[in-house]
Image (cartoon, helix red, strand yellow):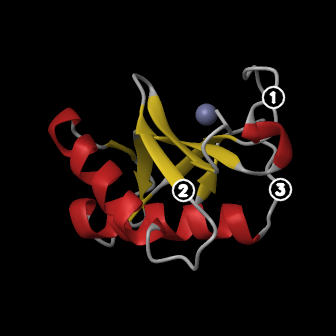
C-alpha cells in the first residue's frame, strides 16, 4: 500500500483490515504488479463526526502504481464496482461485532467501520 503525499493515517486493527482487504481485491482484479494507494486518512475535509478522524475510515484511490515500472496505473471504471464488492467480501470475514462498509464514491473508495463513520 502506498500513501499519497500528505496523507496521515492511524495504523490500527481497523485500518490494517481495510488496507489488507483492498489490496487483496486489487490483486485479484488488477494482478500482483498493481500497488494500491491510500488517498486520505485522518487529514482532509470530512464531515464533522467522520470516522476518518478516529481511525475508522480511509479513502482508497482509483490510481495506484505498477510495482515493476513505477508508472501510475488506474483501475478501469468498469472494474471499480467489482473491487468494491471484493473488498466488502473480504471485510465481511472479519470477526463480529466489527461492521465494515465499502462505498464506491466518484473519486475514490471510502471504507469505514461502523454505520455512522462517513
Ligand atoms: Zn472517506
Residue situated in front as seen by the camera: 9 or 84: 84
Q: Looking at the image, do the residues carrying marks 3 and 2 touch, with CB atoms under 8 Å apart?
A: no
The part of the image, by quadrant, that contains residue 90 is bottom left
Give the number of callouts: 3
Pick the front one: 67 or 84: 84
> Can you tell which of label 3 and label 2 is closer to the viewer?
2
Q: Position of residue 75 (x, y in %)?
A: 29, 43
The residue tagged 1 is 49
Give the CA separation, mark 3 to mark 2: 17 Å
Mark 2 CB in 8 Å range of ligand 1?
no
Percent position of residue 92, x then y: 44, 69
Q: Which residue is mark 2?
A: 100
Q: CA distance from mark 3 to mark 1?
A: 16 Å
Q: Residue at x 53, y 76 (%)?
A: 94
- Residue 39, compared with residue 49, is above or below; it is below
Secondary element under disc 1, as helix, strand or loop, is: loop
Q: Is mark 1 within 8 Å of ligand 1?
A: no
Residue hosting label 3: 10
Q: In terms of secondary structure, where does tag 3 sit?
A: loop
Assign ligand 1 to one image quadrant.
top right
Residue 26 visible, this orientation = no
- Which of the two discs, 3 and 1, labels the residue nearer the N terminus? 3
Q: Around disc 3, counting alpha carbons within 10 Å, would you say few (fewer than 14), some (14 to 19), or many (20 or more)?
A: some
Residue in view at x 57 percent, y 61 percent: 18
Crowding at label 1, few (<14), some or many (≥20) Cα neighbours within 10 Å?
few
The percent coordinates of residue 30 (x first, y second) are 25, 60
Element carrying mark 2? strand
Q: On the image, which quarter does residue 41 sit in?
A: top right
| Quadrant occupied by the C terminus | top right
Give me the C-alpha separation between circle 1 and circle 2.
17 Å
Amino acid at each position: 500500500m502506498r500513501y499519497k503525499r500528505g496523507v496521515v493515517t492511524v495504523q490500527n486493527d481497523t485500518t490494517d483490515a481495510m488496507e489488507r482487504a483492498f489490496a487483496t481485491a486489487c490483486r485479484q482484479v488488477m494482478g500482483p504488479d498493481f500497488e494500491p494507494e491510500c488517498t486520505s486518512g485522518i487529514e482532509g475535509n470530512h464531515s464533522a463526526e467522520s470516522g476518518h478522524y478516529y481511525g475508522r475510515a480511509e479513502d482508497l484511490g482509483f490510481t495506484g502504481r505498477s510495482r515493476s515500472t513505477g508508472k501510475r496505473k488506474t483501475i478501469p471504471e468498469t472494474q471499480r464496482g467489482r473491487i468494491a464488492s471484493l473488498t466488502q467480501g473480504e471485510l465481511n470475514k472479519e470477526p463480529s461485532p466489527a461492521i465494515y462498509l465499502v462505498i464506491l464514491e466518484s473519486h475514490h473508495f471510502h471504507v469505514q467501520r461502523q454505520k455512522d463513520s462517513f
